[in-house]
Image (tube, rainbow, N blue to C red):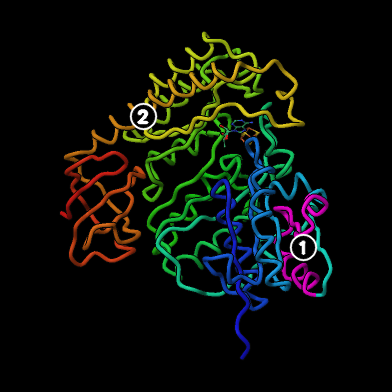
């Protein structure tokens, strides 16, 4: 038998890209590729790119430039660009960087085998269509390799919300939900391969409305179906929009045993004036009332969020309103970004905030978030949590896993295996993780 060809994939950006990279690897697995951890011995290099914030395209071009030497040594090496930069830049990538053999947008990954064959025949291959067919379904001939205890599963893609700062509705297109039966089949398949926790992914995951046996299913409906899957122990989902937190989903947080008490619910700003300018169609107050309802259903839930500071026209007073909202919610995790101009989005045309002021706001917001994060983490000391162990820790004999609240927990333990789900008493809280002992 001939040596398998080697595939190196570098993944940028969100968890949906991580999922897509796995699917691309499987698709090319059918062409005789196995993954390698280094570009140096690769026969194909794929950059799975992200376009959400500035300089993304520039980073891709500089990364591509670094492969020049490799390609000179190895003329058969094929180089591809996938993901949202591929979608946004298209042919321009091949024009600017002739090293590139293949450009594939996020909706066309099922066509990779055929595209790869074209590159082998010496052609360039480009596909940035939004085809009708379900790319995931076409990628079904997955190798049944054993998996780790946690996995992502994309259930919907795209977004119809058009927040004024965001490129997603342009790069990923309109919202599309996968049919429920395919998702459930994929979940069974993951569980058979060793997965015990599934995180359902979507750019607007709680807008999920895939076809079910009796008409469209909601995300809560899908979660209840997955709750029945034997061997699956935990369900999470991300990312959600406040306006799609339906009653049945809030209720599921109170009553669905496998749904974990953690919710990523970005609000972006605490100022109603800015929220309006962002086209968010909710207010700070409506968001806070929503969180009250979620906490009434599940009092111990840990909240997570995203924030943008320095959005065009944001004043110090607007920023103060964001700090006030953060103070009220107290996030266990939150990601804050300095506004980054995305050409083609409505906000790109507006008066930009002084970058020094935006930097200063970002620091102040992050300091507050870190304080809360630490308080919540410290508050776990003395409590008993359930940890799903994912890998060995840095110290000998140590294992690391995640609690239901998504905190990393280190446990010194004999007889703990990857994939075990065990009760742990938290004894200590460090900078970014907890330590505990088996009960
Ligand atoms: N500038 C800064 N942050 C952005 N995000 C999306 N677009 C931009 C932008 N243009 C952030 C939002 C979103 C997260 C995934 O990325 O906070 O929730
Ligand atoms: Fe972008 Fe999320 Fe807004 Fe959609 S809801 S436009 S993905 S920030």
Which of disc 2 and disc 1 is earlier in sequence?
1
The spot of residue 409 in percent (x, y) is 28, 49
Distance (Cα) linking label 1 and label 2: 44 Å
Residue in front for this viewpoint, 62 or 283:
62
Residue under the point 77% across and 31% down: 344
Residue under the point 61% across and 63% down: 23
- What residue does disc 2 label? 370
Say left or right for 193 vs 141. left
- What residue does disc 1 label? 101
Q: Where, quadrant-wise, is the N terminus in this rendering? A: bottom right
Q: Quadrant of residue 392?
A: bottom left
Q: Disc 2 on helix, strand or loop?
A: helix
Give the magenta part as a residue range.
93-120
Q: Disc 1 on helix, strand or loop?
A: loop
The spot of residue 275 in percent (x, y) is 60, 19
- Give the answer, above or below, for where 408 lies relative to 368: below
Residue in front for this viewpoint, 361 or 149:
361
Front: mark 1 or 2: 1
Find out whether residue 78 is within the magenta segment: no
- Give the answer, above or below, for where 241 lies relative to 75: above
Residue in front for this viewpoint, 259 or 425:
425
Say left or right for 439 vs 51. left
Say left or right for 232 vs 2. left
Residue under the point 73% across and 43% down: 173
Classify 10 Å Cα crowding around label 1: few (below 14), some (14-19), many (20 and above): many
Q: Where, quadrant-wise, is the C terminus in this rendering? A: bottom left
């Amino acid at each position: 038998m001939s040596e398998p060809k080697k595939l190196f994939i570098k993944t940028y950006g969100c968890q949906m890209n991580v999922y897509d990279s796995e699917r691309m690897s499987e698709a090319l697995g059918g062409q005789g590729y196995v993954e390698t951890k280094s570009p140096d011995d690769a026969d194909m290099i794929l950059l799975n790119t992200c376009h959400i914030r500035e300089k993304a395209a520039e980073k891709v071009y500089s990364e591509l430039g670094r492969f020049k030497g490799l390609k000179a040594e190895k003329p058969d090496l094929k180089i591809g660009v996938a993901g949202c930069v591929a979608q946004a830049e298209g042919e321009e990538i091949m024009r600017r960087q002739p090293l590139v053999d293949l450009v594939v947008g996020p909706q066309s990954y099922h066509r990779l085998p055929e595209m790869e064959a074209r590159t082998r025949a010496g052609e360039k291959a480009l596909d940035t269509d939004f085809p009708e067919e379900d790319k995931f379904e076409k990628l079904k001939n997955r190798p049944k390799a054993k998996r780790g205890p946690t996995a992502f599963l994309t259930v919907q893609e795209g977004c119809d919300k058009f927040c004024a700062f965001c490129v997603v509705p342009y790069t990923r297109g309109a919202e599309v939900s996968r049919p429920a039966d395919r998702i459930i089949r994929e979940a069974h398949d993951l569980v058979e391969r060793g997965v015990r926790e599934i995180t359902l992914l979507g750019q607007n995951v709680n807008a999920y409305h895939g076809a079910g046996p009796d008409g469209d299913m909601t995300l809560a409906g899908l979660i209840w179906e997955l709750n029945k899957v034997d061997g699956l122990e935990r369900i999470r989902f991300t990312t959600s929009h406040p306006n799609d937190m339906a009653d049945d989903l809030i209720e599921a947080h109170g009553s669905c045993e496998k749904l974990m008490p953690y919710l990523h619910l970005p609000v972006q700003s605490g100022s109603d004036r800015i929220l309006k300018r962002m086209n968010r169609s909710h207010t700070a107050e409506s968001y806070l009332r929503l969180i009250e309802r979620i906490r009434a259903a599940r009092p111990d839930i840990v909240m997570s969020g995203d924030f943008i500071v320095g959005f065009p026209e944001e004043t110090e007073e607007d920023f103060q309103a964001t700090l006030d909202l953060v103070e009220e919610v107290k996030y266990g995790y939150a990601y804050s970004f300095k506004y980054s101009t995305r050409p083609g989005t409505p906000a790109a045309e507006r008066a930009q905030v002084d970058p020094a002021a935006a930097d200063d706001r970002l620091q102040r917001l992050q300091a507050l978030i870190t304080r809360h994060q630490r308080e919540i983490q410290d508050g776990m000391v003395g409590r008993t949590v359930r940890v799903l162990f994912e890998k060995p820790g840095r110290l000998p004999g140590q294992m690391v896993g995640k609690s239901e609240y998504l905190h990393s927990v280190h446990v010194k333990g004999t007889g703990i295996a990857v994939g075990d789900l065990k009760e742990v008493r938290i004894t200590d809280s460090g900078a970014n993780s907890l330590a505990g002992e088996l009960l």
